[in-house]
Amino acid sequence: MKSTISVRRDIPSGTIIIDRPERANAISRFTIIELRQALDDLHQERQVSAVILTGRGNVFSAGTDLVELQQSRADADGDLQWHQDAEQFRDLFLALLRFPKPVIAALNGPACGSGAGLLLAADIVVAASSACLSFPEVSLGLVTGVTAPLARARLGAALATRLMLTAETFTADQLVHHGIASEVVADDLVWARCHELAAQLAENRAEAMLMTKRLMNESLGEGLVTEMTVGAALMAAARTTESADEAVGQWLEARS
């Protein structure tokens, strides 16, 4: 099976690139497995002080691979598969939150749905001027699921609810205004700025950064894990509905 991510080791940083530009860097089941493996590999690299996460081309990630989701409807074990898919997303987000090194998201373009979840699980976000964030699930008969509790923890209940019920898009400037991104730079400077930050982080003591990150993320509370598990169940349940089947089918037909 063709790899869906690329990993670079540009010491002192390691870079994970979602490498499916032909599918707007949509996240498949195999992509989740590869992302977890890449994190494990970079964890072992002592010279890597920080990890940069980005997407190939001019899209960060379109989120869940809807083609793969729709194909699962023909599978006799489709319902079970959707529960496993949702739990894999939950475990991936938790792995990013618990990763012992800083994770910098290079937001090079749109981040949608589960792709926005990856963004919210990062420690630092640098946005390109053309970048944006949205949660389009409700327009597709789906539920944001495991991303919802994370969004509420990062953004506050009112803003997270607004974004998920309206499916509106936040621009790069709005991301900075609401504290999601730390800064906005020109599109062609995102990569360089993230590497500058990685070099700056490399000057710090690894043990102190680990403990600081643990302090910040553990303040989210064990309740977050429980809420994400509930979100995974709702995420899977929404995929079984006729509404989702119709809406996703229409979206794929329009796309083709």
Image (tube, grey):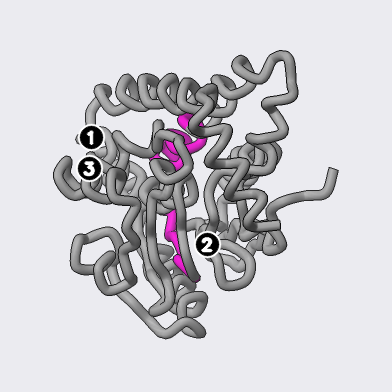
Residue bounds of the magenta highlight: 90-108
Instruction: Please give the name of the residue rendered at 22% of the width and 48% of the height, measured from the top-left corner.
Output: 162
Mark 3 nearby-residue class (10 Å; few <14, some 14–19, many ≥20): some
- In the rendered image, the vertical position of residue 188 relative to residue 203, given as above or below: below
- Residue 106: in magenta span: yes
Query: Does residue 101 appear anywhere in the picture?
Result: no
Q: Amino acid at mark 1?
A: Leu
Q: Nearer the viewer, mark 1 or mark 3?
A: 3
Quadrant for the N terminus in the image: top right
How far from the left and from the top, in percent, is residue 122? Answer: 39, 51
Q: Nearer the viewer, residue 18 or 255?
A: 255
Residue at image position (58%, 49%) is 251
- Earlier along the polypeptide chain: callout 3 or callout 2? 2
Estimate the x, y position of residue 49 in percent, counting from the top left. Answer: 48, 57
Q: Nearer the viewer, mark 2 or mark 1?
A: 2
Query: Are circles 3 and 2 on residues that touch, CB within 8 Å?
Result: no
Q: Is residue 76 magenta?
A: no
Specify the quadrant of the image occupied by residue 74.
Answer: top right
Mark 2 residue type: Phe
The quarter of the picture where residue 23 lies is bottom right
Numbered disc in front, either 3 or 2: 3
Q: Along the horizontal axis of the image, is 43 left or right of 204?
A: right
How far apart marks 2 and 1 lie (CA) works out to: 25 Å
Label 1: which residue? 220
- Which disc is residue 161 wearing? 3
Q: Label 2, on which residue?
A: 60
Looking at the picture, how far across and down is residue 17, in whole percent? Answer: 62, 59
